[in-house]
Amino acid sequence: MAATIKFIDGGSVTSPQGFSAGATYAGLKTFAEDKLDLGIIASDSPCTAAGVFTTSTIKSPTVSVNQAHLKLANPKGIIVNAGIANACVGEQGYKDAEEMASIAASKLNTEPSEILVCSTGVIGVELPMSLIRDGADNINLSKAGANQVARAMMTTDTRPKEIAVSCEIDGKTVSIGGVAKGSGMIHPNMATMLSFITTDANVEQHFLEHCLTEVADSSYNMLTVDGDTSTNDTVLVLANGSAGNDQIKQGSQDADTFEAALLEVAIFLTKELARDGEGASRLLSIEVTGAKDIKSARQAARTICSSSLVKSAVYGSDPNWGRVLAALGRSEIEADETKIDLFVNGVCIMESGTPIPFHKEAVVVLMKGPEVTFKLQLNLGDASATAWGCDLTQEYVIINSAYTT
């Protein structure tokens, strides 16, 4: 019997034992009284860690630094800034990323190799390191500081995104907390965001890496807002073992429970990122079932979810389901029109390839709600996948036409 996974009220990255956080306004964003732009997440002890990163060939030096540090040491902290991406600035970008690690290491009394570094914001601008040095001195770390970090990570996000869950593993209560930022420049491989997950579980290194890869493929990599992928995409998991459970390994009794809990956190954050897509007014979910294999199911769901025509129809509450089928057709997966069932928010509008008469006005009303779901049953196999995105609005164009001004 699967263990129960419980949501923690007000949960965050400091819900797991042994983690603290804090943030400050360092001056990287335009000033406002409540703005924050530099944060730190810290563990009391070294962590087993894993990361997944952008697949872009143009990437921020923070990605390279993190990949190197994960091979060198067991991390004790993460430093993150918003406002400036530290990307496409030449060799100076790598030096600045390393210096950010040194700044955080000095504050946490540890080694620079034990610090992971993330930046987000405008590409092509050098980091003002003097501001970051001074800002880090002003950060006070505490259990209550998680929301500060969630706010400090934000760029065009309209709200912070946090969660924590708990479950029983080896007779111990284990917690997993997460935070994410992302609103635009979001598309699979890896959908653009920064996301940090902490846990007090004792997890073996290779199993944690395996878990994060599997979880990312079912969550973060199924997210699309606008078809653009970033230079800085990073998801990190830190596990400090403070819960005192026996180490979780591949094939151990509680391995499935841990992975399920990690997936719960990741999917929650993924959906929150989609809801808060730039200019978004509705969450879009594309459920593909009955595909021949998981690769096909994911490819179909992502292709439909990223369609500008589908996203525009959702914005207008227009049940123009032909656009969904057209996007499926260009996804290059195996599909047989005569076998497809299609639903809009639970209303069947196609069965075995034949359109079903439906009350258009009623479906329009359903589509005016906060979430629109298209479900396609391909009836070719047993594989299924879900992709998440949002509608395409005029506000998206307004936001991105003046991003740097």
Image (cartoon, rainbow, N blue to C red):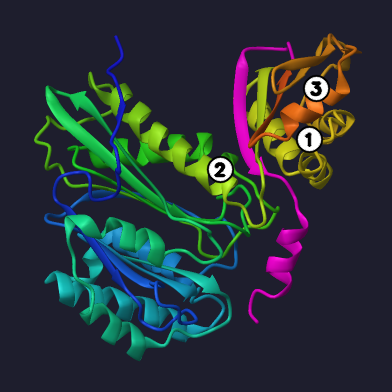
**Residue at image point 39% right, 72% down:** 34
User: What quarter of the picture does the C terminus occupy?
Assistant: bottom right
Type of residue at label 1? Answer: Ser
Quickly name the residue at label 2. 221
Mark 2 vs 3: CB contact within 8 A: no
Looking at the rendering, which quadrant does residue 383 occupy?
A: top right
Is the residue under label 2 in contact with that under label 1 (CB below 8 Å)?
A: no
User: Which residue corresponds to mark 1?
Assistant: 331
Tell me which label, 1 or 2, sits earlier in the chain. Answer: 2
89 or 107, nearer to the observer: 107
Q: Of discs 1 and 3, which sits in the foreground?
A: 3
Q: Nearer the viewer, residue 148 or 214?
A: 148
Badge nearest the viewer, 2 or 3: 3
- Image location of residue 147, percent across then percent down: 32, 57
Residue in view at x 82 percent, y 42 percent: 316
For residue 362, the mark is 3
Mark 1 to mark 2 CA distance (whole Å): 16 Å
Q: List x then y, in percent, for residue 173.
A: 16, 30
Which callout, 2 or 3, points at the residue further toward the start of the chain?
2
Where 140 sits versus 326, above or below? below
Q: Give the extent of the magenta segment.
A: 378-405
> Vertically, is 160 above or below 300?
below
Give the Cα separation between the discs numbered 1 and 3: 30 Å
Looking at numbered disc 3 in the image, what kind of residue is underneath it? Ala
160 within the magenta span: no
Q: Position of residue 122 (x, y in %)?
A: 56, 75
Quarter of image, res 288: top right
- Work out whether residue 392 or residue 236 is closer to the camera in this orientation and state it: 392
